[in-house]
Image (spheres, rainbow, N blue to C red):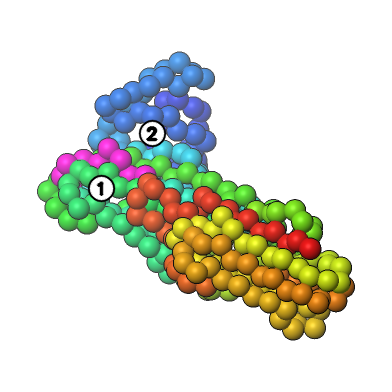
Amino acid sequence: MNRAIGLLVAFTTASFASGCLDHIVHVDGRDPVVDPAVGTAVHATHTDRCSFAEPNNEREQSTSYALGDTVYGCITENDVDFFEFQAPGDVAGGYVKIDLSNVGITGAIEYEVYSVSDNGQIFGHYGSNNGQSIAGYFTAAAGVRYRVAIRTFSGYTSSYDYDLKMAYTPFVDVYEPNDRSEEAKPIPVGAPIEAMMSAGHEFADISSADFEDWYSVDLASGSVHVKLENVPSDVALAVSMVDSSGNEVGSGYSSSAGASAVINADGIAAGTYKVRVHLFSGDPKVVGRSSQFADTITKPYKLTVGQ
């Protein structure tokens, strides 16, 4: 593989060997552009692509990658290119979009994504045809390291080029972390709040508990109305409320994916209550094998507790 930048910025021998360079511009041997800081156009030849930063065929030899950079790589016979990166420290986590484009016509390419925490495979994707571009995404947890392996899936006849770009987008959820009862975050009475029904991959698998959201709310005596709406279309959600002793006051659930859920309860005592939002049915799309994102990735739910 090759991360083409050499003629555009100053670098040391150590940085060149590590494969971790400061920034990259789009120069791929076919469509050069001018670096605005330097005013120079540079080509990355096929030979450059196939020699730079090798060997990185094993996970222990992974090339360091900076999210948002473009890698100009090459796959040779029986070749694997490993890249490793760390997700940013956003408490709520986020998602990483993977794009493999400008794939040469002498092979069908594939990628696999692993969590460094357990070396488990999160997911993978491949092109059905030689030269086919592929995309995908997965949810990332704060500060966790990941590896991406790129290789030929089928149809190899000779070495071929590819461009790799991985971009990170943080989830907007100011209430995280709140996956546990003891982490319940306070919310106001009568004002809607928004949060994400998603979870990042610390390991290859995500537990159902990682999708729970807990809140606390101070209520006066009387009745309470809880409404959970704007539910993502790929899941049905449930909501429940408990008092300070852990006794359930009420619960409700979506009748179908994307449907709202409500709680209506009368005769409650004044005090602090906890509200739990969790999965009822459906499969949150924490990985995807296209450039189209599932609702759970981009659409927050809305929760209102009123009296």
Residue furthest left as drawn: 157
Residue 133, percent across and down?
27, 44
Residue positioned 26% across, 27% down in the render: 30
Question: Mark 2 highlights which residue?
Answer: 4
User: Is 77 positioned to the left or the right of 209 in the image?
Assistant: left
Residue positioned 83% across, 67% down in the render: 219
Specify the label residue 139 is tagged with: none
Tell me which label, 2 or 1, sits earlier in the chain: 2
In the image, is residue 106 part of the stretch drawn in magenta?
Answer: yes
Quarter in which the C terminus is drawn: bottom right
Q: Residues within 10 Å of mark 1 (few under 14, many from 20)?
A: many
Secondary structure at badge 1 equals: strand
Residue flagged by tag 1: what amino acid is it?
A: Ile
Residue flagged by tag 2: what amino acid is it?
A: Ala
Say whether residue 150 is visible.
yes
Please name whichever residue, 60 or 294, is drawn nearer the observer in this view of the structure.
294
- The magenta stretch is 99-107
Residue positioned 15% across, 44% down in the render: 106
106 shown above or below 111:
above
**What type of secondary structure mainly makes up the magenta span?**
loop
User: Is 158 positioned to the left or the right of 294 in the image?
Assistant: left
Question: Mark 1 highlights which residue?
Answer: 75
Question: Pointers 2 and 1 in contact (CB under 8 A)?
Answer: no
Between marks 2 and 1, how big is the CA–CA gap?
A: 15 Å
Please name whichever residue, 133 or 193, is drawn nearer the observer in this view of the structure.
193
In the image, is residue 89 part of the stretch drawn in magenta?
Answer: no
